[in-house]
Amino acid sequence: MTESESAVGEGRKAVSPLVRRIGLLVMLIALAVGVSYYLHYRSTGRYLQETNDATIQADQVAIAAKLGGYVRLVAVADNQSVAAGALLAEIDPVDIQTKLAAADAGIASALAAQNASRASRAEAEAGIAQARAALQAAEAGLALAAREVARYRPLVAAGAEPAEHLSQLTANRDKAVADAAAARAALVQTQRRVESISADTLRLGAQVGAAQVGRLAAANDLAATRLTAPIAGRVANRTVRSGQFVQPGMRLMTIVPSQDIYVLANFKETQLGLMRPGQPATIRADALPGVTFTGSVESVTPGTGANFSMIPPQNATGNFTKIVQRVPVRIRILAGPAARRVLVPGLSLNVEVDTRAAKGELDAIRSEQERGGK
């Protein structure tokens, strides 16, 4: 054996124990990392549900025309920020103003006719008092004539008075009877006239109400010519232009709220067992790398996304392939004004929800079912 070979052999003998120690140390570190990961998974990791199927959402409002007409003014530009109640556009109000003036004239005419009817009713009621007085006078004359006939009849029968005088008194009594009947008929006629005028007054009052309703409708239409922002936000998808003719219900633009944004995360059905409202969430936006937002679960949709689609799947027909369903979960996001300028609806997110607060509920559900669901 040469000197060089002897030196190599001695080096191997010297290095081998060190290598064994390093290998043992690496194995111990790997075992410790594995145990630590397992313990972390058992205590925390398995309760952290994560998905990248999440986006920013906002309850945006579509602005549509209530009336048809030519657009006289468009007061906003694309992507402009507007306050609630701000003017967005205006439809030419000339035709509606004409209808409003006609409604005012109709109200004035109906009120004049109603006032005339009320005056006629007052006159007729005065006629009732006059007819009632005439009836009382006729009845008093009839009573006097009847008493005269009754007083002179025995005198004529005894020959103390001539028969011609009794005949005259009898004729006067019969005339008084006719006068009383005429006065009674005149009173009834006057009362009927008052009733007729009262009915006509009610009809005219209804016309006044109809005219006022017509004016209110015209006033509402006039107000509808001015399209205002129902919420604060930013203008998007603006399709209206000045001079354009719009139809009722035609979509003109959309107001996207810049403050009231939220997260809609679509979790797999296998992740929802312990997800409850109020649980904390961690949110990361692709548009803002390195920035983490906090949030909390607000609600879980009562159905899968497929259940609310335009054409829900019919699993009872044809061949069936099981697909893991997803359920939308609404999450409140806590972000400052600077971040909200960037977080617009539609942006992609990564969301992680900590469900540890409900970790005991799965055992409670199992025990409940073991007791027969009672």
Image (tube, rainbow, N blue to C red):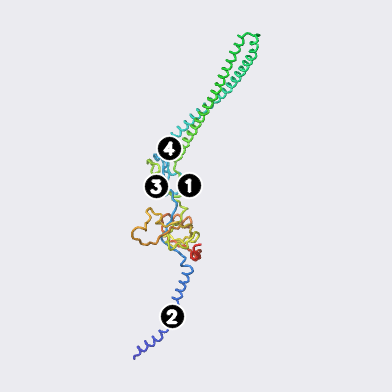
Q: The N terminus appears in which quarter of the rendering? A: bottom left
Label 2 vs 3, first from the N-terminus: 2
Front-most of residues 260 and 167: 167
Q: CA distance from mark 2 to mark 3?
A: 69 Å
User: Within 10 angstroms of label 1, few (less than 14), some, or many (20 or more) residues?
Assistant: few
| 314 shown above or below 151 | below
Q: CA distance from mark 3 to mark 1?
A: 17 Å
| In-image side of 315 versus 262 (left or right) | left
Front-most of residues 126 and 276: 126
**The disc labelled 2 sits on which kind of residue?**
Leu
Measured as percent of width and height from the top left, residue 102 is found at: 45, 32
Measured as percent of width and height from the top left, residue 94 is found at: 42, 35
Front-most of residues 17 and 177: 177
Give the labeled residue for mark 4.
93
Q: Secondary structure at mark 4?
A: loop
**The disc labelled 1 sits on which kind of residue?**
Ala
| In-image side of 150 versus 249 (left or right) | right
Rendered image: mark on residue 24 = 2
Q: CA distance from mark 4 to mark 1?
A: 22 Å
**The disc labelled 3 sits on which kind of residue?**
Arg
Rendered image: mark on residue 84 = 1
Q: Secondary structure at mark 1?
A: loop
Rendered image: mark on residue 238 = 3
